[in-house]
Every structure is written in C-alpha cells, then in structure tokens.
Image (spheres, grey):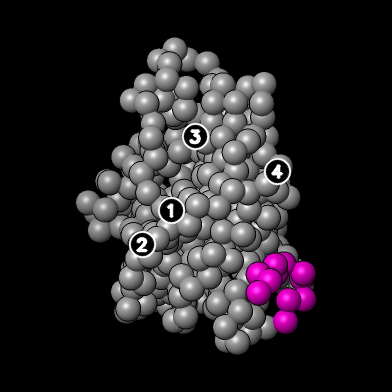
Amino acid sequence: MEIRYELSKNLKEKPTDETKLGFGHVFTDHMFIMDYDTGMGWHDARIVPYGNIELSPAAMCLHYGQEIFEGLKAYRTADGKIQLFRPDENFKRMNVSAERMVIPQIDEEFCLKALMELLKIEKDWVPHTDGTSLYIRPFIISCDPYVGVRPADHYMFIIILSPSGAYYSTGLNPVKIYVEQKYVRAVRGGTGFAKTAANYAISLAGQDEAHKQDYEQVLWLDGVEQKYVEEVGSMNIFFVIDGEVITPLLTGSVLPGITRKSAIEICKKKGYKVSERRISIQEIADAYDNGKLQEVFGTGTAAVISPVGHLKWGDKIMTINDNKIGEISQMLYDTLTGIQYGKLPDEFGWIYKLED
Ligand code: COI
C-alpha cells in the first residue's frame, strides 16, 4: 500500500526545556492514519498534520470500547541517530489484542514501515536529554455510527508521537504500591492479556483509592481468589526472593510485556535463576518477614524499570531494600537503557535503526 503525505505548513515550537516534558502531554506535528472497511481491508494510508479526528458521537468505540493500543519508544543515541527497541514485538502483540477484540488483523511489516516513515518526518522531535524519548502510541478504534453491540465494519489505525520524560515523576526512585483487595483487573478468559482500553478504565477506581492513601500504583491480585499476584497495570512485576528472580506466569490475565520478556532474557543471560510462576501475596509477605524479600520492581515500556520501595497489603506495610534501588533493578535499568540508547552493544538483536 502506498502512503500519501500531506505535510503541515505550520510546524509547532518544540519544547525548549526537555527536563520538563513529563509523560504524554506534548504531541508532534504529524500522525499516521489508515482506514479499514469490511470488503476493502486496510486502505488510504496517510501521514497528515496532527489534529483532531472526525468521529460520529455514535462511533462504536465510544460506547463499547472496541479499541486496542500499543506503546513503544524511539531513542536518540549519542551520535544523534534514532533507534527503536523491539518494535516488531509491539505490532505482533497488537494482532493478538486485535484477535481478542474482534478487530481486523494488521500487516505488521507495513505498520512498522509506516511508523519508520512517520519517524523520518518527525525525527527532530526525538528529544536529546538523558532519560527522554519519543513515546509512540499506535491504536485502533471502531468507528461505525451505530449503538448496537457487534464488531464494527469501519476502523481507524492511528499512530501519534509524544516526546516524553519518565513515566513516574519519581524517575528511577522507588515507588509506593498498594495491593488491591476490593477490585479485580482481569480474569482468565477475559481481556487481561490484550492491550485494550477496558483494562485501564477498570483500574482507575483502585488507582484512585491508592492515591488517596498516598500510594502511586496498584498491584492487582488474581480475579478469582485474590491470592496470586498478577501485574500493576502500567507495568509487570518482579520479586527477588533469596536470589531467585520471580515474575507471575502469563496465565491469560496478565499483559505479556515486552520489557518483561527482555528483563527475563537479560537476567537469564547474566546467570540469575529466573522463574515464571504463580506467586501468592502471602508468599511475598512471608519472604519479607523472613528477611528474604530482596527486591521488588516493575517493568514496562513507559516505566522502564521501576523499583518498588513500599508495598502495602491490608495493614501490612513492607519496606523493601530500605526503599533503595536494588542491585538487579539497577542492572536491568542500565542494561535495557544502555541497549536502547546505543551505549551498550545490541547483543540480543533488539534494535531497529531509523535510516537517514
Ligand atoms: C506502556 O508502558 O507503554 C503502556 O502502554 C502503559 C501505559 C499505562 C502508559
């Protein structure tokens, strides 16, 4: 499919102080869009000025949430070049999410090419300051103007770009996490493994409660027994107990994070014992009481590696590693960001470079 270009005549001012970018507030000059119609497939691929899109108030995504999205980043290397981290994995996962949400499959290679074309136009928006990147948000929405419940016939696939800093305002400093006991995020057979809006909407009540208690994020337990740890919502979760690196098994209700998968591969290569298994919150509390809970950290594209300094489960407050960044968290952060920003060799073959 050919991509049509309609470039903006009014380019925006780029942020002057990149240390104040925050996360997801600023958007670039252009976006990529293509349409899908039953009988025609994906068509009319175009790069157009970033701006509001026209959508009927009856558009199905607005009523029933038939939507999927992805999150990845473009990084600027010391020599000024731009590169991506495992973008093929994002488009692959997008098709897994699409299948669950009865959204038509995308051509993964074409979407990656379209992203590269968009990045070539927007390359000056990739920030230069340490710890910043250009956050990339591809998403698909159902657009038919119809208020009945069924899969749509018309969809839009859009990619927008946002120069960003750290996801958490605390950066790499440990976050405070609250173990949710009232609400659940996902159940087996549901949509937990898909990157779809509903999983995030459903998390807001828990997050709101956590914020009221001065905690940044929610740790979700399984939706049936509320016994086993699942994920944080904005990131996957890892525990280091007595030298063993443990992360919940992907049982269908946990997002298969690309940073999660990369962290597992790095830890294994460095010789750590890594287990993907079910782990109960009681096992974590016991390990804490026995002095064996060495580290807790989250992994995510936006969050990268986020050490957890406090974990609150009911009345029990666990302070992990003296609220300091642990050895494995730091190693993973340095290795991942080292590869992403081109400071370390790409020994796993994860980097895609943007051609000049
Ligand atoms: C990401 O890490 O890219 C995500 O999509 C999570 C989102 C909460 C920012």
Q: Which of marks 1 and 3 is in front?
A: 1
- The residues bearing labels 1 and 4 have C-alpha atoms spaced at a distance of 20 Å
Say whether marks 1 and 2 touch (CB < 8 Å).
yes
Q: Which residue is denoted by mark 1 in the rendering?
A: 49
What residue type is disc 3 on?
A: Ile
Q: Which of marks 4 and 2 is nearer the N terminus?
A: 4
Say whether marks 3 and 2 touch (CB < 8 Å).
no
Say whether residue 309 is visible: no
Q: How crowded is mark 4: few (under 14 residues within 10 Å), some or many (20 or more)?
A: few
Q: Which mark is on residue 141?
A: 3
Q: Residues within 10 Å of mark 3 (few under 14, many from 20)?
A: many
Q: Residues within 10 Å of mark 2 (few under 14, many from 20)?
A: few
- The residues bearing labels 4 and 2 have C-alpha atoms spaced at a distance of 28 Å
Say whether marks 1 and 4 touch (CB < 8 Å).
no
Q: Which of marks 1 and 2 is nearer the N terminus?
A: 2
In the figure, residue 217 lies in which quadrant? bottom left
Q: Earlier in the sequence, mark 3 or mark 2?
A: 2
How would you classify the magenta stretch by its main secondary structure?
A: loop
Residues shaded magenta? 345-356
Q: Which mark is on residue 1?
A: 4
- The residues bearing labels 1 and 2 have C-alpha atoms spaced at a distance of 9 Å
What residue type is disc 2 on?
A: Asn
User: In the structure shown, which secondary structural element does the residue marked by tag 4 occupy?
Assistant: loop
Q: Residues within 10 Å of mark 1 (few under 14, many from 20)?
A: some
Q: Which residue is denoted by mark 2 in the rendering?
A: 10
